[in-house]
């Protein structure tokens, strides 16, 4: 059973929320982050990326940086930009992009559920990426970026969400990227019902935010060494939790920068050994599982994995993924790319950019071959996590991104 608690949220006033809400800290490099906060003193990114307040050669991982984040956070509270709710609540958070909406429950997930694999993972984390957020959370004494969790369909929670989303939202704004954000504070009448609903859900799944979750857990473990207070707020981490039916995964496309000294004809011949191929007008998306689009030499092909290939991976939650089939049958044997995490001859493009971006990269000489993927499904993500396995790199792209700074959990 999963534990998801209500909490006393620290959040901005409705007149400030649009100025405060920021994309996650890790979608920017250092230069981009500094540009993003220019002229935006109330953007939460100032707190999430405190090095933006210093010169470009400043050590962004120094203790001084995190103390700056704490100083800014306290300043935001002292100036009334943020206030803390007086009662424990759950919230609903809806994001609408391109006419499609998804709505999740905001609450606190359990560190112990994470440690006991009730909260399931599908991605490997890197310690060096965790350390930054460990220091940030520990010194600011607050969790500021929600973890994106999912659960298998649940009609009881669906009913509660439907009833509360008919009410007047406490926030309703459109961000710069044209995503509409609405938030409802759920009536406390529902608190016990929501808690019990989650207790009847056997597992939660991290959709996005593996490093943030791991960091929150390690802060909790660090504090438990000093005092093992089971009621302490650090035993829980801020989350937005979605029914699987609400979510839509976008493809994570591939661009190869080199041809591995093979001609277009050789590449086509080698691929045709394991894929049925046909030339086609350029498609905006790949609609069927185990099909791929390939851009090469101003031509577009549809590839379909042959039956013998599919028979060889049937029943394997990892090898049957389209990203695995492409890696095992094309990228490694034909292009020599054995580890896409580290090989500099491949780059990745989130599906929000579309096939036009792939074509523009090839046209400008920034690649020689591009592959348009069919998106990984939520069912595939669940299957990998349930098998306690890890997805290959760059398997999923979730959009729109949850904003930081709308909800804060003080620990």
Image (cartoon, rainbow, N blue to C red):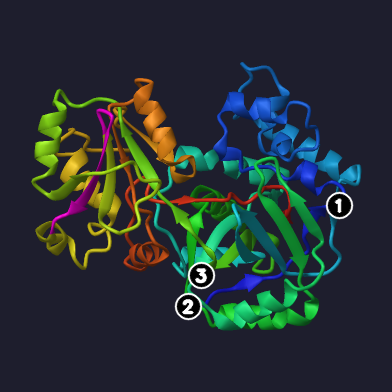
Name which of mark 2 and mark 1 comes first in the sequence: 1
Residue position for label 1: 13
Name which of mark 2 and mark 3 comes first in the sequence: 2
Circle nearer the viewer, 2 or 3: 3
Please say whether residue 76 is visible from this viewpoint: yes
Residue at the image point whose x is 37% and y is 50% from the top = 395
Compare residues 286 and 54 and report the one nearer the observer. Answer: 286
Q: Is mark 3 on a helix, strand or loop?
A: helix
Residue position for label 2: 202
Are dots 2 and 1 in contact, CB under 8 Å?
A: no
Circle nearer the viewer, 3 or 1: 3
Are dots 3 and 1 in contact, CB under 8 Å?
A: no
Residue 100 location, quadrant: bottom right
Q: In this view, does 295 lie to the left or right of 129?
A: left
Compare residues 118 and 104 and report the one nearer the observer. Answer: 104
Circle nearer the viewer, 2 or 1: 1
Compare residues 109 and 39 and report the one nearer the observer. Answer: 39
Residue at the image point whose x is 78% and y is 56% from the top = 172
Q: How crowded is mark 3: few (under 14 residues within 10 Å), some or many (20 or more)?
A: some
Placement of 70 over or under 362, stated as above or below = below
Q: In which quarter of the image is the C terminus?
A: bottom right
Residue position for label 3: 245
Residue 259 lies in the magenta-colored region: no
Q: Where is residue 241 in the image (x, y as percent from the top left)?
A: 58, 65
The magenta segment: 296-306
Residue at the image point whose x is 44% and y is 67% from the top = 117
């Amino acid at each position: 059973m999963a534990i998801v608690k209500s909490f006393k949220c620290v959040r901005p006033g409705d007149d400030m929320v649009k100025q405060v809400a920021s994309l996650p800290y890790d979608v920017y490099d250092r230069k981009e982050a500094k540009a993003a906060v220019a002229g935006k003193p109330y953007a939460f990114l100032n707190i999430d990326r405190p090095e933006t307040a210093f010169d470009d050669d400043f050590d962004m991982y120094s203790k001084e940086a995190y103390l700056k984040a704490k100083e800014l956070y306290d300043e935001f509270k002292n100036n009334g930009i943020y206030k803390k709710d007086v009662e424990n609540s759950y919230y609903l958070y809806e994001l609408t992009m391109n006419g499609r909406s998804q709505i999740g429950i905001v609450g606190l997930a359990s560190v112990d559920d994470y440690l006991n694999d009730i909260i399931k993972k599908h991605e490997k984390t890197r310690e060096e990426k965790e350390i930054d957020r460990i220091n940030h959370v520990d010194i600011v004494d607050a969790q500021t970026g929600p973890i994106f969790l999912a659960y298998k369909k649940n009609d009881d929670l669906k009913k509660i969400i439907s009833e509360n989303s008919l009410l007047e939202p406490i926030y309703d704004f459109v961000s710069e990227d044209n995503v509409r954000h609405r938030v409802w504070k759920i009536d406390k009448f529902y608190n016990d019902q929501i808690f019990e609903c989650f207790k009847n859900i056997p597992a939660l799944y991290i959709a996005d935010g593996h490093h943030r979750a791991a960091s929150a857990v390690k802060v909790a473990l660090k504090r438990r060494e000093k005092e093992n207070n089971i009621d302490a707020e650090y035993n829980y981490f801020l989350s937005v939790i979605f029914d699987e039916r609400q979510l839509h995964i976008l493809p994570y496309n591939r661009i190869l920068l080199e041809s591995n000294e093979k001609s277009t004809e050789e590449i086509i011949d080698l691929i045709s050994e394991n894929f049925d191929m046909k030339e086609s007008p350029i498609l905006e998306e790949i609609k069927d599982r185990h099909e791929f689009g390939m851009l090469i030499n101003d031509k577009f092909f549809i590839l379909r994995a042959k039956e013998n290939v599919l028979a060889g991976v049937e029943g394997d939650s990892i090898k049957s993924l389209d990203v695995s089939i492409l890696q095992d049958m094309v990228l490694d044997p034909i292009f020599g790319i054995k580890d896409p995490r580290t090989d500099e001859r491949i780059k990745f493009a989130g599906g929000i950019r579309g096939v036009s971006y792939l074509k523009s990269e090839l046209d400008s000489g920034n690649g020689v071959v591009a592959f348009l993927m069919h998106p990984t499904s939520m069912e595939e993500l669940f299957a990998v996590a349930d098998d306690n396995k890890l997805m290959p790199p760059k398997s999923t792209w979730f959009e729109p991104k949850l904003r930081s700074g709308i909800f804060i959990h003080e620990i």
